[in-house]
Amino acid sequence: MRRHPVPLYTLLAGALAVVLAAALSITLTTRPAWAATVVVQAESYAAQSGVGLEVTADSGGGQNAAYLADGDWMRFDGVDLGAAGPLTVSARVASATGSGSVELRTGSLTGPVLATFSVSPTGGWQTWATLTADVATHPTGPQTVFAVLRSATPGDFVNVNWLSFGGGGGGETPGWVAVDQGAWNAQLAQFRAMTPAAVPADSVRVPEFNATCTYSHSKPDDPIVVPGLPGASHMHSFFGNKSTDAFTTAQSLQAHTGTSCTPAEDLSAYWIPTLYEGGKAVEPDGVIVYYGSRLLDPSATVPFPQGFRMIAGNAKSQVPTPAGSANQFYCAGEGGEIGRSADGNWPVCAPTAKLVYQLLFPDCWDGKHLDSPDHKSHVAFTHNGKCGGDHPVAIPSVSFVIGYPTGGSPAGFSLSSGLASSIHGDFFNAWDNAALGQRVKDCVVQSAKCNSAGTF
């Protein structure tokens, strides 16, 4: 075929208190309704010329159309391009040598061009990249789509794993995921029937409990933003549920009991963009996920429903972050910050300190949806110590406190999403209902500081 660090929890103790106080014949796999995207696997063609198949090396990748050259093509029938309006089309490709393009045409091999992807070497036949094109106008509804390979150079130049079509306009905005009201009412009833534990007289009266986590694994996946599309995201560092990948669902999280967090009852998935220093990934040596309250009356707080998800931060933000600006990484530990990187965007820490970031999530919920199109609109931040209006339900205030085993240098760092300002995080709830509910009841509702075990 062709082809001697101080433990994170000690370093953060003082700094954290300050921060918290302030703050078909083909197989068409459809992503969940809330994603409104159709994914077409390359091996699901109805007809082809010059196409061979092989197993895709990375987990969840299925098969791919391999070693394609100029003039090769695949035909896919019944591809639903949706209603009129903007359409985002993507192709997951890999290339070891050569260059060319993948043309997507509708109707026939010479039909109108829907989108064109320029292909250049990605680093290997199994080194995958996701190419994306935005289409302003297009045929609507089910269509025959041809993928036609073009190259000015002889020989194989590309492998194709899948194509995706999504984001068409018209009709109700996709992406809203309704909570199962029956299941939610039952969870609330269980929560309200719980008897709170007695708070010892010497307890710290702060509404808070936590999960202490370690780094689990890295993947260029994001099951909230691009579910069902392995490799479609920038690199993420995952902690919590060890099964998390592009195909993660609420059900898969609950079925997989391996977690890098304590307590074991927290099977939630958490992830952040990967940090790089000198081109090498630096993974967190510890993450504390705090669940607290910033409300005037924390007793109004209720647990998260199963399958709830949200995002904090903005991966598209690419602005300078000099000292004192928003989205600021800081140094925790003795000596603190001793300088700034050459570009001013990153602190340089003393040898006895380490790089830290705290990411705060919204704490008010609309009470109706597990997710929204932008993964933010179903939640909001409280600005006056109360939840109301379109987001009347008080949920625990989640924050990630992320510690890295490095202090940095004048060369600075980068994130897989770009500049420091692009820091963001994802939370996909899969706590055991009873364990989460009892912690909210004991620790948050009673304004009593609890540990990872949920005790005072």
Image: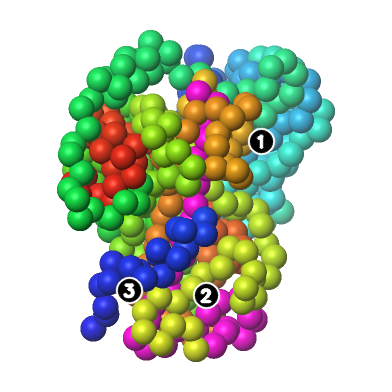
Q: Are marks 1 and 3 in contact (CB under 8 Å)?
A: no
List the residue tagged with mark 3: 11
Q: Position of residue 434 (x, y in %)?
A: 23, 29
Q: Is residue 331 visible to us here? A: yes
Q: Reply yes or no: does residue 351 show up in magenta.
A: yes
Residue drawn 41% across the image and 87% down it: 335
At which x and y percent is residue 370? 48, 27
Residue density around tag 2, few if under 14, some if 14–19, many if 20 or more, within 10 Å? many
Q: In the image, what residue type sits under mark 1? A: Val
Answer whether residue 241 is magenta in the image. no
**In the rendered image, which residue does mark 2 sit on?**
413
Question: Label 2 amino acid?
Answer: Phe
* 191 relative position to 174: left or right: left
Disc with the residue nearer the chain's start (1 vs 2): 1
Residue 89's mark?
Answer: 1
Q: Is residue 213 visible?
A: no
Q: Nearer the viewer, residue 333 or 377?
A: 333
Q: Is residue 162 left or right of residue 146?
A: left
Residue at 75% in and 18% down: 170
Separation (CA) of disc 2 from disc 3: 21 Å
Which residues are the magenta region?
339-367
Which residue in the rendered view is the most extreme toward the top?
182
Q: Of the residues tagged 2 and 3, which is closer to the observer?
A: 3
- Disc 3 residue type (three-letter): Leu
Of labels 2 and 3, earlier in sequence is 3
Kindly indicate the quadrant of the structure image that contains residue 55: top left
Q: Vertical placement of 442 versus 337: above or below?
A: above
- Quarter of the figure with residue 195: top left
Q: Are marks 1 and 2 in contact (CB under 8 Å)?
A: no
**Horizontal arrangement in the rendering, residue 298 relative to residue 339 (left or right):** left
Contact between marks 2 and 3 (CB within 8 A): the answer is no
Q: Disc 2 on helix, strand or loop?
A: loop
